[in-house]
Every structure is written in structure tokens, then in C-alpha cells.
Image (cartoon, rainbow, N blue to C red):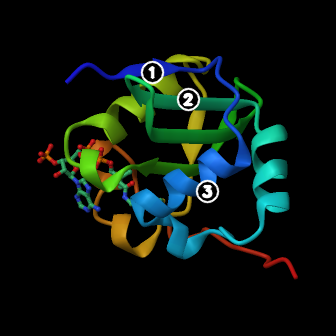
Amino acid sequence: MDIAYRDDIRISAEAAIDLCKRSTLGDRRPVDRPDIFEGMLTNSNLIVTAWHGERLVGISRSLTDFTYVAYLADLAVDTEYQRLGIGTELIHETKRRLGRECMIVLLAAPKANEYYPKVGFEHNPRAWVLKGG
Ligand SMILES: CC(C)(COP(=O)(O)OP(=O)(O)OC[C@H]1O[C@@H](n2cnc3c(N)ncnc32)[C@H](O)[C@@H]1OP(=O)(O)O)[C@@H](O)C(=O)NCCC(=O)NCCS
């Protein structure tokens, strides 16, 4: 399948929300709050999207200094396109845009917890969250 990976396309909050819903990540993101999605997209400095023709089929959204750490805030692939290697390729495309020594840190969604060891991540039991709201 011919999938294009792009870092130069600014997607709308509506498009990101729609992809979240199509990937099931929408269960864990505020898909009823386009204002929050607007901030997520505007203030991220590395967003790689995956396209099958005109169809948005995946996203990797990170906040990063490009040298030390990248926080991979969202990784999502359209359910119709899952298990085809697109998630792995989105991680590679993200890493490729970072400095060689830069690490990637993320919080896994429960459904994806078994995915990350398969794509090279090490489990870190010292992740901490200070919740908003
Ligand atoms: C998790 C997700 C990003 C993976 O993307 P993908 O394109 O489906 O995954 P890939 O095709 O790159 O899979 C690579 C390998 O991991 C496996 N894998 C994929 N999803 C998995 C999951 N949820 N749990 C365990 N293994 C998984 C694949 O079977 C494949 O294994 P193989 O190499 O032995 O065949 C995608 O399934 C998704 O969007 N899930 C819903 C949203 C979500 O939970 N996102 C993560 C938020 S932290």
C-alpha cells in the first residue's frame, strides 16, 4: 500500500478529532473539545501524518527540543489501516527528524501497552502524571 509520510501538512482540529475517533484513541482524548485539539496541534513542534491518497490514516504528534527528548503525545492509526506497519513507520519518521541522541518518551494507552516493546521501547515504571483540571 502506498502511504505518504508528511511533516509539512497542517491538519485541522476536526481532521485530528476524526482520526482519533477512527483509531479508537478518541476514547482517551477530549474529542468533544476542539479548542483543546486546536492547542494540541498549534503548539506541537513535530507532527508526522500518514496519508493514503487524500485520506489521513495516521498521526504521530510530539513536543520536542530535538536534541534530548521528544514527548510523543499521540500515536494513532485508522483502524482500517492498523497492523500494516504504519504505526512503526510513524515512529521511524519521527525519530528520523530528531537528533541521533534524542530519546522518545510516551505514556501508553492501555490497548497499546503491549505494542511499544515490539517497536523497541523500554518500560519505565517511574512515569508520573500531575493531572490537569
Ligand atoms: C497502537 C497503534 C499506533 C499501532 O499502529 P499499527 O500501525 O497498527 O502497528 P504496526 O502495524 O506498526 O505494528 C507493529 C507490530 O506491533 C503489533 N501490534 C500492533 N498493535 C498492537 C497492539 N495494540 N498491541 C500489541 N501489538 C500490537 C503488530 O501486530 C505488529 O507485530 P508484528 O511485527 O509481529 O506483525 C495503532 O494500532 C493504534 O492507533 N491503536 C489505537 C490508538 C492507540 O492506542 N494509540 C496508542 C496511544 S499511546
Residue labelled with disc 3: 17
- Tell me if mark 1 has few (under 14), some (14-19) or many (20+) residues whose alpha carbon lies within 10 angstroms of its own: some
For marks 2 and 1, give the CA distance. Answer: 7 Å
Q: Are marks 3 and 2 in contact (CB under 8 Å)?
A: no
- Tell me if mark 2 has few (under 14), some (14-19) or many (20+) residues whose alpha carbon lies within 10 angstroms of its own: many
Q: Which is more foreground, mark 1 or mark 3?
A: 3
Mark earlier in primary sequence (3, 2): 3
The residue at the far bottom in this view is 133
Find numbered disc 3 in the image and state the secondary structure of the residue it sits on: helix
Q: Are marks 2 and 1 in contact (CB under 8 Å)?
A: yes
Location of the N terminus (image quadrant): top left
- Is 23 left, or right, of 37 in this rendering? left
Say which of 102 and 31 sits in front: 31
- Is 47 left, or right, of 55 in this rendering? right
Residue 5 seen in the figure: yes
- Is the CB atom of the residue marked by disc 1 within 8 angstroms of ligand 1's nearest atom? no
The label number, if any, that marks residue 27 in the structure image:
none
Location of residue 87 by image quarter: top left
Residue 123 seen in the figure: no
Residue drawn at (35%, 29%) of the image: 89
For marks 1 and 3, give the CA distance. Answer: 19 Å
- Is the CB atom of the residue marked by disc 2 within 8 angstroms of ligand 1's nearest atom? no
* Amino acid at the residue labelled 3: Ile
* Amino acid at the residue labelled 1: Tyr
Residue labelled with disc 1: 5
Residue drawn at (55%, 29%) of the image: 48
Residue labelled with disc 2: 48
* Amino acid at the residue labelled 2: Val
